[in-house]
Image (cartoon, rainbow, N blue to C red):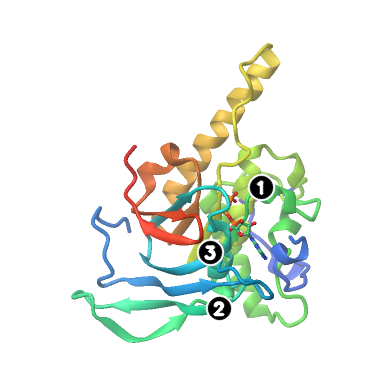
Amino acid sequence: MAAALSTPIDWRNLSSISTAPRSILKLKRNLPSRISCSNYSCLEVRDVYYRPPGTQLNLINGVSFSLPEKSFGLIFGQSGSGKTTLLQLLAGLSKPTSGSIYMQRYTNEGKPIQSSESLVPERVGIVFQFPERYFVTDSVLDELIFGWPRQRAGPQLKERLALNLQRAINWVGLNGISWDTDPHSLSGGYKRRLALAIQLVKVPDLLILDEPLAGLDNLMFPSSLNQFKYSTQYWKARADVVKLLRHLKKELTILVVSHDLKELVALVDLSWRMEMGGVLREERLKI
Ligand SMILES: Nc1ncnc2c1ncn2[C@@H]1O[C@H](COP(=O)(O)OP(=O)(O)OP(=O)(O)O)[C@@H](O)[C@H]1O
């Protein structure tokens, strides 16, 4: 019988892979309700502008915001306003034309401690819209270890990665799924769990999710028992992903872009509206 994901990993047997992020390969503590940057580390985005090379138009226009660690930030706004472009800058997939993105620690009094640290791409996890479209292997284990270093990883690094992998699987509740399950055969909700686990292995300083509920929609009103079962499963997938994000929020700093405000509002500590032209304004959700 195939090993399940709760089975301890023998890291010596793990194959390893290229270091290119899959996004490119496939062009592919509970905080109090008043959130402030004191005695916490914060993601700081200061006066960021972005104009794609060879164009005259700024897609991101003077964006500044702070997101304290272990809080949940939500960016919403019209299609084409620049939300995904901003996420790509935060993930290091493109470089701001000007401005800075860094991590800063603060004292209880809200004063910065020491110098700031850049937010390096290796410390950011990003899950794109419809992440299951970017699955590239035919087993859950291969998918999880796809981005691991191939030659350079020594035994210590491999062991650490294996421990992180086990933790990521526990976080997203994938235990019980066989290692050699084809990722494409998983249900919609479990595909999202797997996509999250892949990013969680590196225990990111910032976890970015672009439309985490997209595609987990209900079907039309069920016209047969079979379709009814299917649609129920889909509703459950949406609720499951929201539940999972609630759980992850206790451990990680999360920034989400979504149109699904009603389902996510209970998780949100800070929210911003992206206006057309890439201008970001803080706006509390009233739902
Ligand atoms: N490399 C580029 N060069 C020129 N324009 C671009 C480039 N990349 C994106 N755009 C444009 O920038 C604008 C913002 O795109 P972006 O995908 O960030 O919007 P969005 O708010 O995430 O939209 P959606 O909600 O539909 O995903 C769009 O008008 C898009 O066509």
Q: Earlier in the sequence, mark 2 or mark 1?
A: 2
Query: Is 81 above or below relative to 45?
Result: above
Label 2 or label 3, whichever lies nearer to me, is 2
Label 3 or label 1, whichever lies nearer to me, is 3
Compute the Cα span from label 2 to label 1.
28 Å
Q: Is residue 57 left or right of residue 105?
A: right
**How far from the left and from the top, in percent, is residue 210?**
56, 53
Q: Write the residue at 57% across / 35% down.
A: 237
Compute the Cα span from label 3 to label 1.
18 Å
* Secondary element type, mark 2: loop
Query: Is 244 above or below relative to 127?
Result: above
Q: Write the residue at 77% across / 49% down.
A: 180
Task: Give the labeled residue for mark 1.
Answer: 130
* Mark 3 lies within 8 Å of ligand 1 (Cβ measured): yes
Q: Quadrant of the N terminus?
A: top right
The quarter of the picture showing ligand 1: bottom right
Task: Give the labeled residue for mark 3.
Answer: 86
Say whether residue 131 is visible: yes
Query: Is 178 above or below relative to 206?
Result: above
* Secondary element type, mark 1: loop
